[in-house]
Amino acid sequence: MTVAFTACISEQDRVNIGHLQTIVFDLVKTNVGNAYKGTSGIFIAPVSGVYGFHLSAMVTVDHVIYLNIIKNGVNFDVMVAEGHGRVTTVTEFWTIELQTNDLVWIQSDTTWVDGHITALHGWCNSVFSGFLIGV
């Protein structure tokens, strides 16, 4: 079975992102197997196996965002993008073992933002992708 998706944030900037908010990558470019839900931002594993997930997040000048990759409601890992005086892009790749119907999504965390504006630059500069590596 082939499972693969790529989705991005379509608008120019998504600003003032709240605490523990699911980040919806609304413009779905590829969705083989229909496992990524572009309206909710949630990936639902159609089969058990090892999956690869890639996140690329761009922040503009003086914006900060902490992003968690969540598996079934539990934080799997965190990624930080800080635009101190410049536009910054940060990328991360994870391999995660999933069972059928396990859920994976990206979630904001504003705990350590310290007064900065939480924002992601869009126009498909912030992208979430995933694919089945093997069963």
Image (tube, grey):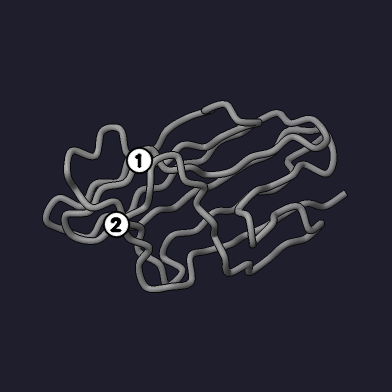
Q: Is residue 26 left or right of residue 120?
A: right
Which of 31 and 134 lies nearest the eye of the viewer? 31
The quarter in which the C terminus is drawn is: top right
From the image, tell me which residue sits under label 1: 66
Q: Which residue is located at x 37 percent, y 52 percent?
A: 17
Asked which secondary structure carries label 1, the reply is strand
Which of 17 and 70 lies nearest the eye of the viewer? 17
How many numbered circles are shown? 2
The image quadrant of residue 113 is top left
Three-letter amino acid code at the position of disc 2: Val
Quick one: label 2 or label 1, which is nearer the N terminus?
A: 2
The image quadrant of residue 74 is top right
Residue 88: image tag: none
Q: Is residue 107 left or right of residue 130?
A: left
Distance from the alpha carbon under mark 2 to that under mark 1:
11 Å
Q: Position of residue 110 (x, y in %)?
A: 32, 39
Q: Is residue 62 above or below residue 106?
A: below
Q: Position of residue 87 (x, y in %)?
A: 23, 60
Q: Is residue 70 left or right of residue 96?
A: left
From the image, tell me which residue sits under label 2: 59
Q: Which residue is located at x 69 percent, y 38 percent?
A: 103
Q: Position of residue 86 (x, y in %)?
A: 16, 58
Asked which secondary structure carries label 2, the reply is strand
Q: Which residue is located at x 51 percent, y 40 percent?
A: 93
Q: Position of residue 2 (x, y in %)?
A: 82, 52
Q: Is residue 114 above or below residue 83?
A: above
Circle 2 Cα neighbour tier, 10 Å, few/some/many (<14 / 14–19 / ≥20): many
Three-letter amino acid code at the position of disc 1: Tyr
**Residue at the left extreme?**
85
Circle 1 Cα neighbour tier, 10 Å, few/some/many (<14 / 14–19 / ≥20): many
Residue contact between numbered discs 2 and 1, judged by CB atoms under 8 Å? no
